[in-house]
């Protein structure tokens, strides 16, 4: 229990949280919302999100490693905070559920057309439960194992090399996005980074030696690097207008791979991506758990975990169809972007206020 | 621990049993190998004639169904009523379009091919000059057991050497969507004892508009993409005597497209494009008067080859310009050399048909075979 997370484990954990289902649509999201050579815009957004991570670093430094709850509860009444915690807990359950369910709806489309998705989702939720009842240190170890199982898929991009042409990237930048250049569209792409903000829940599990933010930044930049490789491959492999019309370009890219002994490998490779979603769902459930534990610190072990996973499963009933699920996923991820920015800023304000008061108090004495 | 273990075992059992709800048993499925689409008659509202070929498990015969229907999937349902096995598209290898349908436009039938996740993107797109239904219904080809199998290996072998473009669903949709290039497909013809690649179909958007003759397919390949290991026979017109024959084998080529001038493009002046083709191969046949022992004659032959290939290529470009179809992707290069707003206003097919495209061929004979002369 007292083991602390190491930078390497944190990096793989963040990498796995960010590598969720949004990845499958990412090349299309970028082409659709940013236009030609959108990958440049993606790099820009990667830097913006890195800036966001630095806000969390400021919170960590100013709060001297105290958890978000300790900081808030020092200045604000529990009567205000607990409803907020509860609200966020429910919200995180929704993200966890929609991310997981979306994966299985796509899975149903390509492989298990007649199976009951909720049944497969139930099995998934059981796996989430078994991860969630372990301390976060063990979750991160599982994430590391899973990360090694997924990294090699990046090498599959070499299969696209033969048909890859620089000319298809075009010489234009950010032209012809489907819906014009607006902030909303760029936010669509930004949803692919969602996951790094969960680092705030790791504060109680690290010490100085852990180098928490080194891990978070590495994990985040590793994700960005992997995605840039995938994006560049997709932009040179598909024509731009085609990319805009493909729902999940990654599946089409996998579909293209043909080996002498096997073809249509997308069915096999797609399964491997379940790990990324497993970690995403688990960590968002973990975020929810941290909230609920703060409200009910003295419940029996595993009871809260069970209730949260049950919640994830029940919310899963809510998204039945793929298009509906996509819409719900977009909505919650959009909100999460807002939270990812507002939360650290709020905490910084509270910390400044606390410092100011301390100074005033010391002046009075 | 024991409770956990028991739980784990139950879970494993549950996991394994999940597969039972979604069974795909090979023996109970009919794998469609080939689909052919054609028009059933004349006129606007004529129905599609859809033919499917399903190889039997003995690999020697194929079941062929044919029907008239409004769409491909509707036809599939009619076939499902006849077939004792459930038809699946997972092994679909080629789609054959009848010539008349191809001239009208193929995209509406492509819709289901790109939409259906069970269909792979590597299937070949073929235009048949002969009746596609007849191609599939025959199973007396000496080359292969069934028409589907034979077609598959024929197209693959031809495309592998680069003599014909690899016209898969992936390349077709990719080039169809791209505004700077037009797709192509392989043309197939039925002979008495065989099927043969009879050329390359040029498309404008999704309509078949022109044909590259089979004898010119290698010259088209030089213009269209890099060839890896093709064979090229050139009949050289010389002033020495009658036509001389030279065959280059294991030929490989590279092409480079350079847009020379896009000035005054908006005023309607033709743009200038230079196409440079570098090719090298082994001279494995030469019937003519030159002596390959002499360096000067070697140079001379190279120069004459260059001239002949150049003339042939120029002729093909003229044909493509006349048909307003740009399978070489010159539009992509022009697009990348002008501002976006100019490109958007440009009617590329018109500009292309009037463009001044020059070809420069650079031939290097790698070796002259075993003979010294």
Image: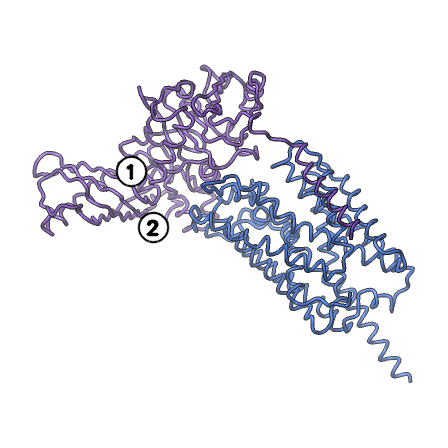
Chain colours: A blue, B purple
Provide the chain ID for the residue under circle 1.
B
SS for callout 2: strand
Is B8 positioned to the left or the right of A182 in the image? right
Where residue A68 sits: x, y (%)? 80, 65
Q: Which residue is mark 2?
A: B258
User: Does residue A250 lie above or below B24 as drawn?
Assistant: below
Where residue A116 sits: x, y (%)? 71, 34
CA neighbours of label 1 inside 10 A, class few (<14), some (14 to 19), many (20+): many
Q: Nearer the viewer, residue B85 or A33?
A: B85
Q: Nearer the viewer, residue B278 or B189?
A: B189
SS for callout 1: helix
Is A231 positioned to the left or the right of B171 in the image? right
Q: Is residue B232 visible?
A: yes
Q: Is residue A183 visible?
A: no
Please determine if labels 1 and 2 lie on a single subunit. yes
User: Does residue B254 lie above or below B28 as drawn?
Assistant: below
Location of residue A118 by image quarter = top right
Cα separation between marks 1 and 2:
21 Å
Q: Which residue is mark 1?
A: B218
Where residue B46 sits: x, y (%)? 49, 16
Q: Residue furthest front?
A: B2
Provide the chain ID for the residue under circle 2.
B
Task: Say if mark 1 contacts mark 2, CB within 8 Å.
Answer: no
Is B177 positioned to the left or the right of A287 in the image? left
Quadrant showing the N terminus of chain A: bottom right
User: Does residue A70 lie above or below B250 as drawn?
Assistant: below
* Residue drawn at x 59%, y 29% as measured from the top left: B25
* Residue drawn at x 41%, y 45% as measured from the top left: B332
Where residue B237 sits: x, y (%)? 14, 37
Quadrant showing the C terminus of chain A: bottom right
| The label number, if any, that marks residue A235 in the structure image | none
User: Does residue A74 lie above or below A43 as drawn?
Assistant: below
């Amino acid at each position: 229990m007292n083991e602390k997370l190491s930078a390497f484990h944190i990096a793989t954990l963040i990498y796995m949280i960010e590598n969720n289902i949004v990845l499958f649509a990412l090349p299309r999201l970028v082409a659709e919302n940013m236009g030609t050579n959108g990958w440049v815009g993606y790099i820009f957004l990667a830097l913006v999100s890195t800036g966001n991570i630095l806000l969390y670093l400021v919170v960590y430094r100013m709060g001297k490693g105290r958890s978000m709850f300790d900081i808030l509860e020092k200045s604000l009444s529990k009567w205000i905070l607990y409803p907020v915690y509860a609200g966020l807990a429910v919200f995180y359950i929704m993200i966890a559920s929609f991310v997981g369910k979306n994966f299985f709806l796509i899975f149903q489309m390509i492989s298990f057309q007649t199976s009951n998705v909720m049944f497969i989702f139930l099995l998934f939720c059981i796996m989430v439960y078994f991860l969630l009842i372990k301390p976060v240190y063990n979750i991160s170890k599982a994430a590391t194992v899973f990360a090694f199982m997924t990294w090699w898929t990046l090498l599959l991009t070499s299969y696209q090399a033969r048909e890859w042409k620089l000319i298809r990237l075009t010489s234009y930048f950010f032209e012809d996005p489907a819906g014009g250049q607006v902030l909303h569209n760029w936010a669509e792409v930004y949803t692919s980074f969602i996951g790094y903000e969960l680092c705030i829940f790791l504060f109680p599990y690290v010490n100085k030696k852990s180098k928490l933010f080194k891990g978070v930044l590495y994990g985040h930049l590793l994700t960005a690097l992997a995605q840039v490789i995938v994006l560049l491959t997709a932009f040179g492999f598909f024509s731009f207008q085609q990319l805009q019309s493909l729902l999940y370009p990654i599946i089409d890219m996998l579909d293209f791979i043909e080996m002498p002994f096997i073809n249509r490998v997308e069915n096999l490779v797609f399964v491997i991506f379940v790990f990324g979603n497993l970690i995403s769902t688990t960590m968002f459930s973990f975020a929810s758990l941290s909230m609920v534990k703060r409200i009910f610190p003295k419940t029996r072990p595993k009871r809260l975990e069970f209730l949260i996973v049950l919640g994830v499963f029940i919310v899963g009933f809510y998204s039945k169809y793929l298009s509906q699920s996509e819409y719900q996923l977009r909505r919650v991820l959009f909100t999460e972007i807002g939270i990812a920015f507002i939360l650290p800023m709020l905490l910084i304000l509270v910390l400044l206020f606390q410092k100011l008061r301390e100074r005033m108090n010391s002046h009075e004495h | 621990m024991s409770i956990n273990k028991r739980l784990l075992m139950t879970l494993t059992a549950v996991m394994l049993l999940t597969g039972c709800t979604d069974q795909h048993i090979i023996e109970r499925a009919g794998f469609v190998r080939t689909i052919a689409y054609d028009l059933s008659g004349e006129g606007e509202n004529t129905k599609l004639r859809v033919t499917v070929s399903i190889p039997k498990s003995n690999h020697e015969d194929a079941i062929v169904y044919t029907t008239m229907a409004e769409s491909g999937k509707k036809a599939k349902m009619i076939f499902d009523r006849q077939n004792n096995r459930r038809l699946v598209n997972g092994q679909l290898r080629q789609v054959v379009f009848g010539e008349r349908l191809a001239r009208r436009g193929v995209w509406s039938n492509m819709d289901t091919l790109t939409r259906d996740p069970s269909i792979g993107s590597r299937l070949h797109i073929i235009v048949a000059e002969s009746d596609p239904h007849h191609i599939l219904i025959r199973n007396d080809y000496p080359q292969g057991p069934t028409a589907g199998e034979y077609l598959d290996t024929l197209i693959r072998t031809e495309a592998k050497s680069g003599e014909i473009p690899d016209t898969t669903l992936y390349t077709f949709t990719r080039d169809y969507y791209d505004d700077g290039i037009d797709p192509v497909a392989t043309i197939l013809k039925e002979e008495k004892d065989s099927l043969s690649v009879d050329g390359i179909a040029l498309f404008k958007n999704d309509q078949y508009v022109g044909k590259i003759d089979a004898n010119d397919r290698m010259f088209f390949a030089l213009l269209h993409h890099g060839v890896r290991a093709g064979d090229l026979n050139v009949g050289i017109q010389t002033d020495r005597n009658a036509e001389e024959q030279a065959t280059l084998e294991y030929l490989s080529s590279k092409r480079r497209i350079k847009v020379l001038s896009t000035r005054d493009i908006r005023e309607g002046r033709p743009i200038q494009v230079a196409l440079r083709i570098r090719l090298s191969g082994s001279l494995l046949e030469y019937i003519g008067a030159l002596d390959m022992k002499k360096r000067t004659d070697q140079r001379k032959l190279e120069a004459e080859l260059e001239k002949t290939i150049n003339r042939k290529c120029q002729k093909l470009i003229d044909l493509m310009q006349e048909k307003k179809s740009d399978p070489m992707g010159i539009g992509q290069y022009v697009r990348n050399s002008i501002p976006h707003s100019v490109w958007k206003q440009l009617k590329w097919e018109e500009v292309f048909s009037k463009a001044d495209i020059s070809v420069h061929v650079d031939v290097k004979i790698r070796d002259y075979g075993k003979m010294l002369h």
